[in-house]
Image (spheres, grey):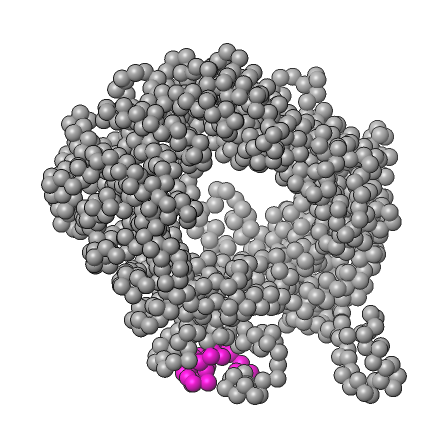
Amino acid sequence: MADPVSAMCEQLVKAVNVMMDAESNQRYRLEALKFFEEFKEKCLFCVPCGLQLADKSQTAVVRHFGLQILEHVIKFQWNNMPQQDKVHLKNCTMELLTNGTFPILEEQSHIKDALSRIVVEMIKREWPQHWPDMLKEMETLTSFGETQTELVMLILLRLAEDVITFQTLPTQRRRDIQQTLTQNMDSIFTFLLSILQQHVDEYRRLKTIPGQELKAKAHCRVGIATLNTLAGYIDWVALVHITNDNCHLLEILCLLLSETELQLEAAECLLIAVSRKGKLEDRKPLMVLFDDVAMHYILSAAQSADGANNPSDQPAGAGLLEVRYTFLKRLCQVLCALGGQLCALVGAVAEVNIPENLNKYMEAFLAFTTHPSQFLRSSTQTTWGNMFRHEVLSKDPVVAQMAVKYLKAAMTNLVKTGFPSHNDSPACEYSRMDFDCDEDFNAFFNSFRAQQGDVARHACKIAPMEAFQIAGEWLQYQINTPLDTGNALSKTGEGLCSMLSPSARQWDAMTTFMESVMGQLFKIVDKEKLPVDQGMELLQAVVNYEMRDPLILSCILSNLSSLFPFVLHRPDFLPQVFFKLFPAITFEVVEESKAPRTRAVKNVRRHACSSIIKMCRDYPEFVLPCFDMLYTQVKKLFANELLLTQMEKCALMEALVLLSNQFKDYNKQKAFLEELMAPVTTRWLSEDMRSVLWEPASFLAFIGADQVVNEPAAEDQMGINRSRISFCVYTILGVVKRARWPANLEEAKAGGFVVGYTPAGAPIYRNPCAEPLLGLLPNLLNLIRTHNSLFLPENMARLSETFSRAYDVMDVEKNLILAISQPTMDMYDSPVYKSALERMQGFFCMLYDNCYHVIGYAGPALQQDFYTVEALAEQLVGSALIHLEHVPDHRLRPLIRVFMKPLVMSCPSEYYDGLLCPLLGLLFSHLLQRLNLRWQIINQRTNMCGSDDDECSEENQVTQEMLEDRLVRLATREVMDLLSMSCISRKLPEPAGNKEDADGDDEMMATDSTQLNTSQTADELTELGKCLLRKEDIYMTLLAISFNSLSWRDTTNCQRVATQVCWALLRQVAGGNLLPEAVTWLFASVLKALQMHGQHDGCNAALTQLALFIYDALRPRYTELRAIMNQIPNIHLEQLEQFDQRTVNPALQKVGEKKRKDQFKKLIAGTVGKPLGQQFKKEVHIRNLPSLFKKVKPSKDIVADSEDAGLVSLFEPDHDD
């Protein structure tokens, strides 16, 4: 035997060297790999070869391969090996553990890992039933030295990971091993702690003795391995093991925080322990960490680590120690977790008092909040928020003091400093370790700032006056501080700030702080106690502050809005606020400049318009006295057509319309709206405009889309034409969006807004904008029809070469759809130069969206005046729903979201038959065909991926395919939202989605099924759904969309539709005479969905429940369902027969609902498909061993037992059930 083994080993060594040699030819490497695989599968002497290759005399790479062979044998051949071979392999493995490795500091880590894997694989197959002394053997191994002790730690850690964390073995074996581990946990923990203590003591003793450094390192290595193993157990063992012996484990861990070489692993263990959930009573001992001693160790370790990162004698640019910084992060997380335990235990049933030294803990926590590292600062925010929100803690004087300190710290933390590429702050050095680039840091900081704003709001609730004082002083300081543009040059103009200028950062931070504080102040402080005088003083300072820098001016406007509620107490100040805002509406850095405006300038103008809208929306009665002044100012601005953009004009008109709602006089408001809209009405209804809006060719010529543009000046006239169309649509939208009748019924009646009452007694209102808007509606609908017609081939051909891509998805929109972050660092500085194509794309996108917004708002705004328009359904079908087969997917979403959804939600029931049924019938019929086709293409593309590598590698094509895929998914979800909203009345909150943290498949199924059952059976049809039910063709379309969508490659949609829609629709017709073909198709659709999505627990539960509902409801009348079940792969026919008989004859049912669901789940398990990553993986089979823990069934014969025990004993707490 030796000769063939040696010969084979020689060949294997050569193959390994070919594989691992960087100079090897690819063909030779593949041949070597093929030789390996054939050897592992077919060779009869794998074990002797593996053992020979694993010998210490071989190179590390060869030894590792030898160990891999042994692992492969155990995984795939163990079940068929004779008992003596198993014992031989086990003994050889134990010999390898004892003598088969180099000393601990010399041995390669991957060799140790491979050897530990072999032992764990044997344990998973044989322990405890066939290897009862395994733990004792492991303990004995540790007596051989540090090398063996480390290997034992690796074995115990990997065992816990495989059994508990990854659960890579069958349920019964997992339970056997887990229960045995649990039973022995006391001795395991005692063993681990003794090993830790022993080697830490030796390490401490030897490290101070000259010449003993290597021995000290060996003991240290064992200590690290033991701490890592403890970390693998602390996460799941009973809390009592962690808190035993007066929290001895936590004490050891705290002491180890001062040991530089062990502190990181000790902190990891401590973090896991302190983060444990469970019964509050069991967690009470964790509060021992708030004691002075424990807190002292934690703080000392933090100060020591921070000092190691910032020693006074460290030369500039020497860099940080990453290990120390990581340790600091862990300590910060430990303090956060301690805060979480404090919030959970204080004030709860556990009756835990606030710790006496809470102040010491919070000072330590504040130190992390003021640390230079932005990441550490952000890590503390959630805990601060929880404490400031806590019912008991928030009232504690210590927390109140800390709230003020937090707010003062926020003044520094809100300033955006610490860019990795800069060196202007101590935070920069830390950021270089946390972020790859400035863009990453910027995205992080924006999120961090939002967190701080939220926490500052809660801190303001605790100390509102102090918060106001801090905000006011900061604002005054910024106003009185000269502008500092710094070294960063602005592209907006000379002497102006860029986003990175010191002044811009300070103003931005202060503005965020002011918004957070003021937003709370006016909510929680009584009107009589408001600091009105100080507030008005601040507001006066803001109004008087003159600034021509757009970034700073934008902050000024924000502060003006934040402080505006003080004006309610000084009405005479209101005109000054508007005189500050109106110049900002027309703000320019350089007057009459021909260059495009920068984003910063545009933002100032939009900010001013938004501020006016906000004031008119939130305080209309208060602003109403200034109406005439505002109207006069707006007329002046409108006199110059080029002074404002169309959006800015529309914003000002919206503000006036909002104020006009306060006239509370129908005729007066109607007259004003007609006057306001007169220029738009004249232009929109002119004969020239009508010919443009009705004819696609005329429309394209009018906007210049059929012309080749070589010079920008040549496009100016066409740009004016586009802006005029845009202004008309913007105006119509602004009026229909904002014009309303009074909310108070009496005021509405007095003002002439009520024209009658419904049979149910509800008032019927009329909108003062109805008459002028309805006159404009025909041309608007024709514009929509023309827009849809533009996608016809003959009209696409009319586009010039310049604008051939005018209907494509805009780059900004594309990035949003693909979740690609926009570069934001320089966007405020750069002038916004747009190409002719980009302007044309923006025009089409805006026009399409706004037109649908108008008819979406028309229903809620105009009510019966809109719904009674003659032949409205025909007009909408002939405009909004025409040529849908040519409309691209990205244009489909606005149609559904901003037109159909509002229409469905607001339409009175009397118009369902005449309006909604024709629209929804046509729309859903088109969507069924469209989405089926789109998903078919995606499925084909998915199946073919990899077949043509050259094509797939084309980046543009891949991006385009991703975009198309994403658009189809988004459109699908919009469609199913519309269907659900139209038909399904939800009775219960939506059940939780995929429960990844469940204890196993069985538990997952039980939980989800129960929720799904109650949820699905509670869903009813809406009134609109019942109306659609009477239209058989429409209802069948809805069923077809719902059941088809189950097998589209979208798990989110599948789970939602299976849970909420399918059964709610089907149960309405399940009792009728369905065609056998339809029943077969419905049931097969669910099974097909299981084949595609059944690998996901949430989808599996929802689809299994749906399949069971269908089978129960329809199987008694349709034998075809049994025929389908017979075709399921690997189905157990006897069990199917039993289940089928019970379904057909409910009288035979003797099992509970839960058990019946489990039976059905097992029956259809053969339909569940595997994920792609598992389809070609060789399966590992681990046989179950004789059960260790058989439950003894209790006697149900109460009478027989009563002689001994009596009925009372059945209810005793210790009764064995």
Left or right? Give the position of 430 relative to 981.
right
- Residue 656, given in percent of the width and then of the height, sits at 34, 33
Left or right? Give the position of 490 relative to 104.
left
- Depth order, front residue of 256/658: 658
Q: Is residue 76 above or below residue 973?
A: below
Residue 1009 in view in this figure:
yes
Q: Is residue 126 above or below residue 503?
A: below
Residue 435 in view in this figure:
no
- Residue 868, given in percent of the width and then of the height, sits at 26, 57
- Depth order, front residue of 119/1056: 1056
Left or right? Give the position of 924 relative to 503.
left
Quarter of the image containing the C terminus? bottom right
Q: How many marks?
A: 0
- Residue 547: name its quadrant: top left
Q: Is residue 817 above or below residue 714?
A: below
Left or right? Give the position of 1050 relative to 797.
right
- Residue 943: name its quadrant: bottom left
- Residue 185, given in percent of the width and then of the height, sits at 80, 57
Q: Residue at x 49, y 79 (%)?
A: 1112
Q: Residue at x 35, y 44 (%)?
A: 751
Q: Is residue 1118 magenta?
A: yes
Q: Is residue 286 above or below residue 604?
A: below
Identify the magenta region. Answer: 1111-1136
- Residue 1136, given in percent of the width and then of the height, sits at 52, 82
Q: Is residue 133 magenta?
A: no
Q: Residue at x 85, y 30 (%)?
A: 209
